[in-house]
Image (cartoon, rainbow, N blue to C red):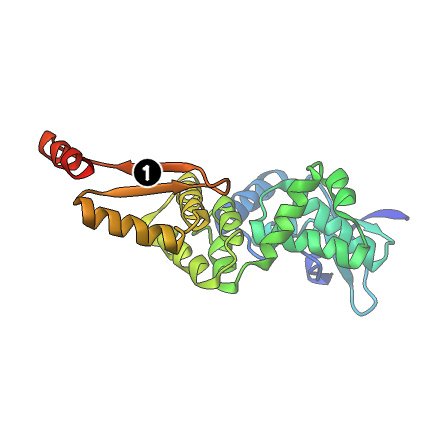
Amino acid sequence: MTEQLKYLNTKDINPNPYQPRLQFKTKELEELAQSIKENGLIQPIIVRKSDIFGYDLVAGERRLKAAKLAGLNKIPVIIKKISDDDSMKQAIIENLQRSDLNPIEEAKAYQNLINRNHMTHDDIAKVIGKSRPYITNSIRLLNLPLHISQALEKGLISQGHARLLLSIEKQDLQDKWFQKILTEQLSVHQIERALKSQTKKEKKPSKDIFLAEKEKELSQSLGLPVVIHYNKKHQGQLKISFSSEEDFNRLMNKLN
């Protein structure tokens, strides 16, 4: 890989097609443009020679946009001789290390490194300085339905919300909780508690039909609520509930 420092016309620099950042904050660009007006572009951007026209941007798109906004015609660049894959890798890693990509942009960037550079989750984790589970969980966000993915990109829901929604397998339930997040402003903790409570209810075993029938018969006969607990060893309890002394006396008379 060879390098060369040079001043180039901004019109001769093409955007990087592998740029993971899809959105640039206008206010931040304006602030950077003002700084460049006052101090110049201190850190050169990185480019490579284009096969078609001029130069392709490798890293520094935010600085390039701000320099154009500041009205600079020529800016300092470092020209590198690198391949498409290396160009993409450098662009993605530079933006990931800035840590201001939205969660979907970040997930797509990781997936691109896997698809184009054949990197593993462990490889990416080492380069970016994150844990492997973090990379894996980030990429899982790409499995979100489009409308939920777009809400995450726009900041309408958090990454924590999105991960909880991913854990819901049924589409109708996923949509139900998504709408509740938007309309009721539910926190991640509130949804976690609600989902755990719902799971416990679903896992609660249904009463044996025979026992349920016997409970009904005894309740009608005694005039009091009856609950039967019966295990596989043919052991259990018969629970009769009463709420007054009168109920208790009536029960005793029936049993005698």
Seen as rendered, the residue at the extreme top is 245
| Most foreground residue, 59 or 213 | 213
Image check: 123 left or right of 238?
A: right
Residue 48 visible: no
User: Residue 218, position in %: x, y?
Assistant: 25, 47
Residue identified by numbered label 1:
238
Residue at image position (22%, 43%) is 225
Residue at image position (51%, 54%) is 153
| Most foreground residue, 17 or 78 | 17
Q: Quadrant of the C terminus?
A: top left
User: Residue 70, position in %: x, y?
Assistant: 57, 50
Check disc 1 and give the amino acid type: Leu
| Most foreground residue, 233 or 69 | 233
Residue at image position (62%, 46%) is 137
Q: Secondary structure at mark 1?
A: strand
Residue at image position (55%, 58%) is 144
User: Residue 8, position in %: x, y?
Assistant: 75, 55
Q: Within the image, what quadrant is residue 41 found in?
A: top right
User: Residue 94, position in %: x, y?
Assistant: 70, 45
Seen as rendered, the residue at the extreme front is 256
Seen as rendered, the residue at the extreme bottom is 52
How many neighbours does mark 1 have within 10 angstroms: few (below 14), some (14-19), or many (20 or more)? few
